[in-house]
Image (spheres, helix red, strand yellow):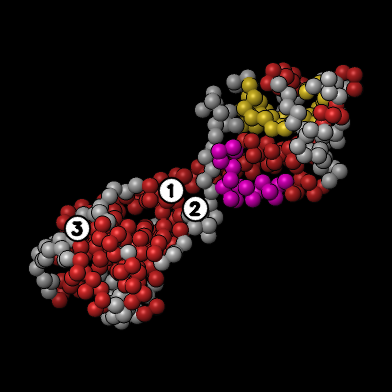
Amino acid sequence: MHNAASVLSTIERPLTAITSDGDAAWNALERFLQQLEGGRLAPDQYATTLGAIREATGAAVVFLYSPYVDGVLESVGNPAPTPHWCREFSRALAVELPQGGLWRAPDFGSRPVFAEGVPLATAVMLPVEAPRPAFLIALGPAAGPPLQESDLRVLRVIWRLQLGHGRHVRLYDKLKETLFGIVRCLSTAIDAKDSLTSGHSERVARIAVRLGEEMKLSRGEISDLYLAGLLHDVGKIGIRDDVLMKPGPLTPIEAAHMREHPVLGERIIESVTRLAYLCPAVRGHHERYDGKGYPDGLAGDAIPQMARILAVADACDAMMSDRRYRGALSPDRIEETFRNGAGTAWDARIVHVFFACRLELYAICQRGLGQSVYMAVERAAGGDASGSRVGSRIHRRVPAGLQ
């Protein structure tokens, strides 16, 4: 039979009450906030939250009891009481403190033993939603510092932080779904505008991604490239059909109308706040490195890098594809065109990257919108695809019976 002292010595962390070490609670809160900001709660949201409460209060055990299922949803700590003990204690405590509060054992002789040889001296209980009504309970053994009224406030603060973060995540997920719907609709609208070039935007996006990978760009930059590639021609929605689908050469007036599509695309994209940062790439993908492009006549590195990459990707797919006025060009012809245009039509550095991976680019074929779009949209929504934006990927774990 273990005595109380020997059992308490097995507790993972020395019991430290907030009253005896004020820094303990602040340090625990700071670490918990870092976990929230870094999106590191999933898939153990409740366990992590209860662990932060235990660390901040110095409690031996913290558990979440649901009267709805009459069971413990989550428990952290050592020594751990049995589920039966937790149910019985929670029921009794809920009757005695229906609004929650601090509980103290009357005297040593009548203190309940919550683990082998470990009598209970204090407990705090907080009614919570998880997502149905439940009770958050922390236990303080007789051999450790007693829990205080201040610990109840710690429970409330940490639980509210977790709830607030959960609401943020749900809104964030809805935002991602909305953005994905917008991107999908715009991409579909571009394809529907001209069936001959259907899939062009998807291929340009994938070619741009491969170029970005070869250039060792960050994951976030590559994600942005993918979205910009999908949306680079969205302005063609505003181009007249007789011009867009004309089989022969365009007249000067028609060509001027066609050259409006980067500006029209920028106007469409900037109206979607979370996609507005892609505007320079969309607007600038027809600029030339020698300054003879459109719509702004930018030259050299004044052209945004994403736009310079998209210009190569766009030209690559255009030359690989059939058009109304010509058939697809051979690889030799494509490579000759890029060699001749390096430093004038396109950034020579990106053309060099094209040659480094051209066989892979030639193999790129049209595919449907898939996981890559979700990843790109997550970054646009504020996700941490590159590590440079604040976001999280918490997935709220709802215990069985509470769904």
In the picture shown, does residue 202 fall above or below 162? Answer: below
Which residue occupies 62% across, 47% down?
35
Give yes or no for contact between labels 3 and 2 (Cβ–Cβ under 8 Å).
Answer: no
Q: Identify the residue position indicated by label 2 in the image.
A: 383
Task: Give the residue type that dot 2 points to.
Answer: Gly
**Are the two marked residues, 1 and 2, in contact with CB atoms closer than 8 angstroms?**
yes
Give the class, few, some or many, for how many residues have Cα within 10 Å of label 1's Cα (few <14, many ≥20): many
Observer able to see residue 228: no
Residue 37 in percent (x, y) is at 60, 51
Q: Position of residue 33 (x, y in %)?
A: 65, 49
Specify the amino acid type for callout 3.
Thr
* Quarter of the picture holding the N terminus: top right
Mark 3 and mark 2 lie on one chain; the one further toward the N terminus is 3
Q: Find disc 1 in the rendering and name its residue.
A: 176
Q: What number is the disc on residue 58?
A: none
Residue 132 vs 253, above or below: the answer is above
In the foreground, 244 or 53: 53
Q: Which residue is mark 3?
A: 197
